[in-house]
Image (spheres, rainbow, N blue to C red):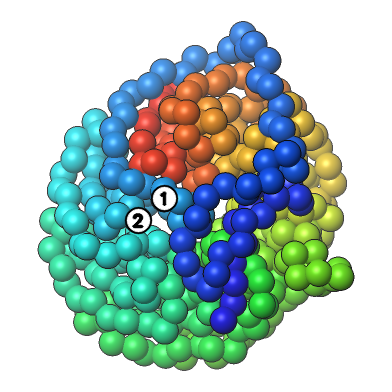
Amino acid sequence: MKKSVYLLSGLAAFALLGGCGWFKGNSSKRENIAQPKVLVELAPTLVVKEAWSRSLGKGAARSGIRVAPALHDGKLYSAGVDGEVSAIDAASGKVLWNRDVKLKLAGGPGVGDGLLVVGSMDGELLALDAANGTERWRTRVLAEVVSAPAVDRNVVYVRTNDGRVYALDANDGKQRWVNDRGTVPLLSLRGNASPRVAGDLLVNATDAGKVVALRVSDGAPAWEQAIVSAEGRTEVERLSDIDGDLKIDDDVIYAAAYHGQVVALSLASGRLLWNRALSSYTNVEVSASQVYAVDDQSQVWALDRTSGASMWKQDALQHRWLSGPAVQGDYLVVGDLEGYVHWLAIADGKEVARERLSKQAIRATPIVLGDTVYVVDVDGELGAYRAQL
């Protein structure tokens, strides 16, 4: 069985997980972990204020995964590892409904077609009515689900921790097809990228450092592209996961891999458009002219969208174990390991605002809706911040 490692900081610190179990705690060898840079006093040039905050149960807790709410039709849908699933009005923070599904959740939520779908550490998939939380169906797959399912055109697509990809009927959860051709390394980072539907293709990222496009009709491969070659003397040195969610924009796929590269690929063919050597464990983000990535030292990079050339690098947050980046207008938003939320100018990477949600790590990528950013920490504290853009 594949084993997972939980990335703590840079290249040096990992805590091994037996099989698909829970993260049992931080590394006992703390002296080997690079210390996060101390935050300097900031004179903000962007006005940001907290709109509301509330607790969402236990959040990701010590599961080692980046559980994030899903935003759909003005509502935030959340799922914690303790089994608490909620729908929240995004504008006010009011809880619309709440349900304890009594499962150890790890994947989700995925929302679409009136469904909210979550996956468990035991391989159970549960679909709820997004309007009221009523159970619609449940089914089992062969391994743990640690990424959000995708729901599109009456089909639910699920990636499991053993590399399989399933297509299930959204009405009853019955299997339409399964692709089990994925290569699963002996050791990988804790987490999986979520599958992405793009027209007639389902784009998936693997623990072996490949981006794979499957036909949504039958799950057959359309193309695949490796963006990292696993090299090194040890299993840890050969880690090559794509754990951050893929970004698809204007028929181009942007992806980043640990011990690998940031790449731009043609959606139609998988052809490599450009690549830049950069090791990352989070998603990439794009604006009109740039691609943004956080490397494994928590340095934030801006790359030219057409060539991958470096535009700027921000190292003031080094070793602060940043979340993935999110674009909000002319700013980039990231969370850190001490519960701080940082706004950087996309023009030059300069930090322009900072707020603190809590004292717990923010691992999930912030969610942006207009002038509001939603962030959640590992203990399930959710905050909404409004910026005067």
Give the camera-side residue of 185 and 136.
Answer: 185
Q: Which residue is the site of mark 1? A: 60
Q: Mark 1 or mark 2: which comes first in sequence?
A: 1
Identify which amino acid the numbered label 2 is placed on. Val
Label 2 packing within 10 angstroms: few (<14), some (14-19), many (20+): many
Q: Which residue is the site of mark 2? A: 81
**Residue sitting at 52 percent across and 44 percent down?**
363
**Residue sitting at 59 percent across and 77 percent down?**
2
Label 1 packing within 10 angstroms: few (<14), some (14-19), many (20+): many
Q: Is residue 166 above or below residue 48?
A: below
Q: Is residue 258 above or below residue 34?
A: below
* Percent coordinates x, y for residue 139 in the rendering: 27, 81
Residue 13 visible in the picture: yes
* Percent coordinates x, y for residue 35 in the rendering: 71, 33
* Residue farthest to the top, as pictured: 43
The quadrant the N terminus occupies is bottom right
Tell me where residue 300 sits by quadrant. top right
Q: Is residue 183 above or below residue 360?
A: below
* Percent coordinates x, y for residue 157 in the rendering: 41, 75
Left or right of 257? Residue 387 is: left
Left or right of 1? Residue 93 is: left
Identify which amino acid the numbered label 1 is placed on. Ala
